[in-house]
Image (cartoon, helix red, strand yellow):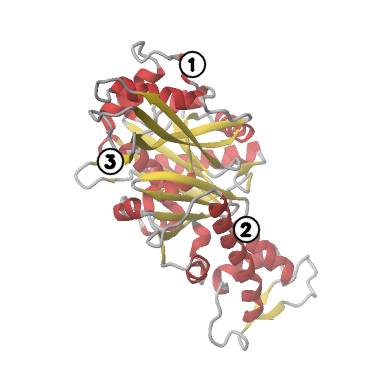
Amino acid sequence: MAGRRPELTLDGALGGGRAPLVAALDIGHSKMACFIMKADGVRHADRTVRVAGVGHVQSRGVQQGMIVDMEGAAQAIGHVVERAERAAGVPVTGVIVSTSAGRMQSHRVRSRVSLGANPVSDADLARAIGLALDKIRLPDRRPIHVLPVAWSVDDARGVRDPRAMRGNSLELDLLVVSMAETAFMSLSHCLELAHLDLQGVVAAPVTSALAALEDDEMDLGALCIDMGGGTTTATVWADRSLLHVESLNVGGDHVTSDIAKGLSTSRAGAERLKTLHGSAMASANEDRELLEAPPRGEDPSAGAVVVPRAMLKSVIAPRVEETLEILRDRIRTGGIALEPGTSVVLTGGASQLNGVRELAVRVFDRPVRLGRPQRAPHLADAASGPAFCAAAGCLLKSAYGPRESVSARRLMTRQISANDAPNPHTGGLVARAADWLRRNL
């Protein structure tokens, strides 16, 4: 992994040309995964990607998405990247990290600029973006996504491209996704220990949605819930825009802990029970079916723990249902109303537990499906399940967007502000915003 290669930005339209190699590293509570895409992996004809190399290992040093053991996490990162390198046949010096760490939040900012007698121009759009960026005040937090939600010209709402329109005022609704600054700094330091350049940080719930959602779901409205080992996160989409991000520090590992406590077994025994026999919904004959699990401790004379399968379900279901209900209520509290036609898609390793989909149908009162990386069609079966949506979506985002209003390089260096370049003719931040608009609207 020695040496450095040219800097990569997620949004090529803002950061110059696209790098010949993209390495996505998904750091989770239960597993770490690395997907590598070469320059020829972007398939514009059908908007898919071909993954050249995949690696995945059991996670170390991570709890609830947070790095708690730098050395352990750095070693695991090194191992997973090396596996992906061997599979792809290329070296990697830097990665884009997908994570759910840092109590992720989304924030809306709005700006309004007056228009003259002329039609809306790129300069007007750049002014609106600059004013919106200047309103972002997030103490002790690091913005990792800055995405336009919608434009408005007077009474015309939800405008996709306002250029050439006429009116008295132009308004912009901007969504900023942020993480705790301490979590960002820990992540950066851990990558340094692994001898890798941190080339960008993306929110795992965002990239999971990009991999799992259909185009129609993006347009008509979708709630994508990413159920990981240490966190459960969600994104709300409509009109091809990200509207909201929600995060809970509760995941599949908490279900394992509940089983270990409730059935007086070891964590390893609880995980085995959950994986092989666990369900969040009732099943036939579960009262008569008995399950065995190892006892806690090392007493060789202690017998196995024997419980009816119904007891296992009685431990799992309340935790899963409570997590989904809290998520639903927080989304409502955030001012996001799920329209009747909004679909629900589950991703993440914990979503594969039997009965979770059916329980989600009951909680959200709408159809629910299990999501997989849909636009990475050549993945092997072992890396094509819901647990790998975040890594695949990271590659998809680098190839197809959505494009950010601020480059990944800028987000890596400091808190964003339009004060650095208030003039759209100086070639600074706002000028790049205008360039983004010309390329992507």
Could you tell which of marks 1 and 2 lies nearer the N-terminus? 2
What percent of the width, then of the height, locates residue 48? 27, 47
Q: CA distance from mark 3 to mark 1?
A: 38 Å
Give the camera-side residue of 320 and 436: 436
Q: Nearer the viewer, mark 2 or mark 3?
A: 2
Could you tell which of marks 3 and 1 lies nearer the N-terminus? 3
- Please tell me whether mark 1 sits on a helix, a strand or a loop: helix
What percent of the width, then of the height, locates residue 245? 50, 46
Which residue is labeled 1 in the image?
419
- Please tell me whether mark 2 sits on a helix, a strand or a loop: helix
Which residue is labeled 2 in the image?
253
Do tag 2 and tag 3 residues touch (Cβ < 8 Å)?
A: no
Residue at the top extreme, as displayed? 426
Horizontal side of 412 relative to 291 (left or right) equals left
**Residue 81 in sight in this render:** yes
Could you tell which of marks 2 and 3 lies nearer the N-terminus? 3
At label 1, counting other C-alpha atoms closer than 10 Å, the crowd grade (few under 14, some 14-19, many 20 or more) is few
Q: CA distance from mark 1 to mark 2?
A: 44 Å
Tell me the kind of residue under disc 2: Asp
Do tag 3 and tag 1 residues touch (Cβ < 8 Å)?
A: no
State whether residue 310 is above or below residue 369.
Answer: below
Tell me the kind of residue under disc 1: Asn
State whether residue 370 is above or below residue 389.
Answer: below
Horizontal side of 84 relative to 277 (left or right) equals left
Which residue is labeled 3 in the image?
41
Tell me the kind of residue under disc 3: Gly
Residue displayed at 25% across by 30% down: 165
What percent of the width, then of the height, locates residue 426? 36, 10
Horizontal side of 175 relative to 250 (left or right) equals left
At label 2, counting other C-alpha atoms closer than 10 Å, the crowd grade (few under 14, some 14-19, many 20 or more) is many
